[in-house]
Each structure stands twice: as C-alpha cells, then as structure tokens.
Image (spheres, rainbow, N blue to C red):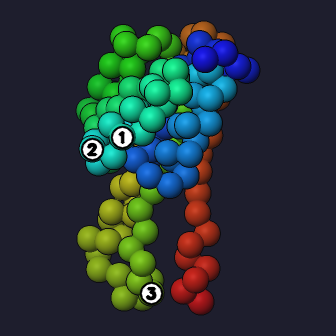
Amino acid sequence: MHGALSGKVAVVTGASCGIGAAISRQLAAAGAKVAMAARRENFLKEIQDEISKEEGVALAVRCDVKNRAEVKELIQYTERTLGPVYILVNNAGYWAFRCMKNLHEEEWDEQVDVNIKGVLNCIRAVITGMCERKSGHIVNMSSDCVKQFR
C-alpha cells in the first residue's frame, strides 16, 4: 500500500479490538507496516488477515504491556521483522467497570500496571531508537469512562 506513512513502522498496543484495531487498519491503509500487540493473539490474527487481504503489512504479536520483558521483545521482534519503529500508539487500557469505592486492591493494581506502567514500558522500549534516528511519534490514548460512575 502507498500512502502518507508508506514504509513507516507503527506499533499499536491494545490492538485486538475496538479503537486499537481501527487505528491499526487506518495506519495500514496509510501505508504503514503495523505491529499489533495485545494479550488476545487470536483476535490479532484476524485483524492481521484483514489487513493482509487489503495488501497491507501487519504483524500480530502477543504482548502484555505490564511485562517489561515482553514489551522489549515486542519492539525487538518488530524491528527485526519490519524495521525501525517510527510510530508508537499506546492504546492498551484496563478499567474495572465498577464504582471506584468498591474496587479491590488487585483491580487498582491492574489499572496502574496497564494504564500507567504499560505506557511507560512501551515508551522506554522505543525512545532510544527514536532519539538516535531523531524521528518518531508517540501517541498515548486515554479514556474518560470513569465519568459514567458519577
């Protein structure tokens, strides 16, 4: 595919459904080579197949952004397979859909580990290469889903 991002490599976390899947499709349509990361590899494979049918380049990689070693391997594998990462979209997120006052400690930990530490793990894995190349873009997604619990 040819487009504004032709040949650029993008990594999208939380890409197995919803907004992450849509971002992956749009990046591929714009010509980017997209590494899609999420915990649910079977869903990633379906999206990879969709993108490939449209002549795009996609790579499905199972990765839990909470795990620094998995994130590091995601970026290393992506760069070995597709090339240097030019775009990172931190889209993985977790929210326990219950009133905050009723959340268990494990749910708080999961939110912090995915929504904060996961973002930092991914940035850490790409930032050195982006700085060395003096080129790159990092997009951090967030949600206002907490508003529904007023």
User: In the picture provided, is 127 more to the left or to the right than 110?
Assistant: right
User: Does residue 71 appear anywhere in the picture?
Assistant: no
Q: Residue 18 at x, y = what percent?
A: 50, 55
User: In the picture provided, is 113 more to the left or to the right than 41?
Assistant: right
Q: Distance between the residues labelled 3 and 1?
A: 34 Å
Q: Which of marks 3 and 1 is nearer the N terminus?
A: 1
Residue type pointed to by label 1: Glu
Residue type pointed to by label 2: Asn
**Residue at image coords 59%, 13%:** 7
User: In the picture provided, is 20 more to the left or to the right than 3?
Assistant: left
Q: Quadrant of residue 60?
A: top left
Q: Name the residue under label 3.
A: 99
Q: Quadrant of residue 3?
A: top right
Q: Residue 13 at x, y = what percent?
A: 45, 42
User: Does residue 7 appear anywhere in the picture?
Assistant: yes
Rendered image: mark on residue 46:
1
Q: Is mark 3 on a helix, strand or loop?
A: loop
Q: Which of marks 2 and 3 is nearer the N terminus?
A: 2
